[in-house]
Amino acid sequence: MLIDEQNFRYTKKWAKNDRTFWQCAERDSRKCSARATTIPDGKITKLSGEHNHLSDIVDLCVKVKEREILNKAVKESKLAPREALADLAASLNTPAMMSKMSNSSNFIRRIHYGRKVNSG
């Protein structure tokens, strides 16, 4: 597994002489054509193609923010679930991040469930 500076993952495709050729780990699932070439010390010498998806770091950032706001909404029962959803949407400041947000109904359902578990 290879991870570049933008947190995109690659899987080894083949090696020849002193170079290793990598393809995006999302090649099959998302038809991503991005590739990388490394030398024996692991240094990336070439990146080609563009990723047609976001890096894993965006997914992680969105999940962390969702968990933070969800926990706050569960603890503060006066915070309406729709307000928590609005807070989440406001904190995800790019369309790319908003596209990774949980379904709004599921997010609200998780707040209600968390409150029920905490009260019982």
Image (cartoon, rainbow, N blue to C red):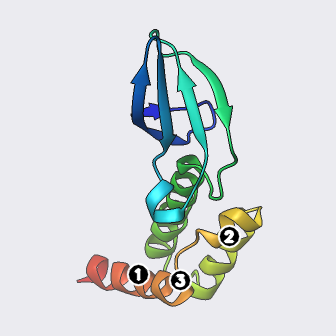
- Marking on residue 93: none
Find out whether the residues at labels 1 and 3 contact each other: C-beta distance under 8 Å. no
Q: Which residue is mark 1?
A: 110
- Marking on residue 103: 3
Q: Position of residue 64 (x, y in %)?
A: 51, 55
Q: Amino acid at mark 3?
A: Asn
Q: What quarter of the picture does the C terminus occupy? A: bottom left
- Which sits earlier in the primary sequence, circle 1 or circle 3? 3
Measure the C-alpha gap from mark 2 to mark 1: 18 Å
Measure the C-alpha gap from mark 1 to mark 3: 11 Å
Q: What quarter of the picture does the N terminus occupy? A: top left
Secondary structure of the residue carrying numbered label 1: helix
Secondary structure of the residue carrying numbered label 2: helix
Q: Nearer the viewer, mark 1 or mark 3?
A: 3
The answer to which image quadrant residue 8 occupies is top right
Image-based side of 67 in relation to 87, left or right: left
Binning the other alpha carbons within 10 Å of mark 1 as few (below 14), some (14 to 19) or many (20 upward) gives: some
Q: Position of residue 46 (x, y in %)?
A: 65, 25
Name the residue nearer the viewer: 73 or 94. 94
Image-based side of 6 in relation to 41, left or right: right
Q: Residue furthest left?
A: 120
Q: Is residue 120 above or below residue 60?
A: below
Name the residue nearer the viewer: 106 or 116. 106
Name the residue nearer the viewer: 104 or 72. 104
